[in-house]
Image (cartoon, grey):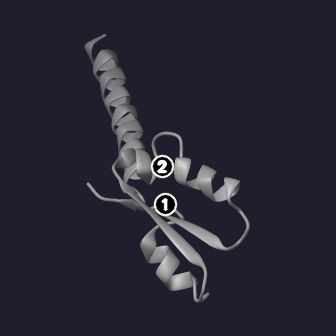
Amino acid sequence: MLKRSLIILIVMMVLLGGILGYGFWSATKLPVNSPEAFLKSHSKRGEQVVVCVGDSITHGQVSHNYVDELAERYSSGKVTFIAKHWV
């Protein structure tokens, strides 16, 4: 009985660690529209660039990504939106 409880406890701890690790990884990875990605891929001259600087909400990995929504709303191709996680 004790051995079974110990095995269940270990499995639950491993699962919890995996869930927390995945959450941390997804919250800290760079968004697609990061400054680093922009500098590597864009060479257009004359386009307007809007940089949104802020905390994890601006980062857009954990909650609603309003920077991508702005990019969709103003998708004329002349404006590029970049998200910079400052904190």
**Identity of the residue drawn at 57% across and 75% down:** 48
Image check: 13 left or right of 46?
left
Q: Position of residue 67 (x, y in %)?
A: 54, 54
Task: Please count the marks in the image.
Answer: 2
- Nearer to us in this view, 56 or 14: 56
Answer few, some or many: residues within 10 Å of disc 2's Cα (few below 14, many 20 plus, some between 14 and 19): many
Q: Position of residue 30 (x, y in %)?
A: 43, 62
| Mark 2 or mark 1: whose residue is earlier in sequence | 1
Q: Amino acid at mark 2?
A: Gly
**Identity of the residue drawn at 48% across and 49% down:** 60
Answer few, some or many: residues within 10 Å of disc 1's Cα (few below 14, many 20 plus, some between 14 and 19): many
Q: Amino acid at mark 1?
A: Pro
Write down the residue under mark 2: 60
- Nearer to us in this view, 58 or 19: 58
- Nearer to us in this view, 56 or 47: 47
Q: CA distance from mark 2 to mark 1?
A: 7 Å
**Identity of the residue drawn at 37% across and 47% down:** 56
Tag 1's secondary structure?
loop
Write down the residue under mark 1: 31
Q: Position of residue 32 (x, y in %)?
A: 54, 64
Q: If the image is split into quadrants, where does the C terminus sit?
A: bottom left
Please determine whether, in this image, residue 41 is positioned above or below residue 71.
Answer: below
Tag 2's secondary structure?
loop
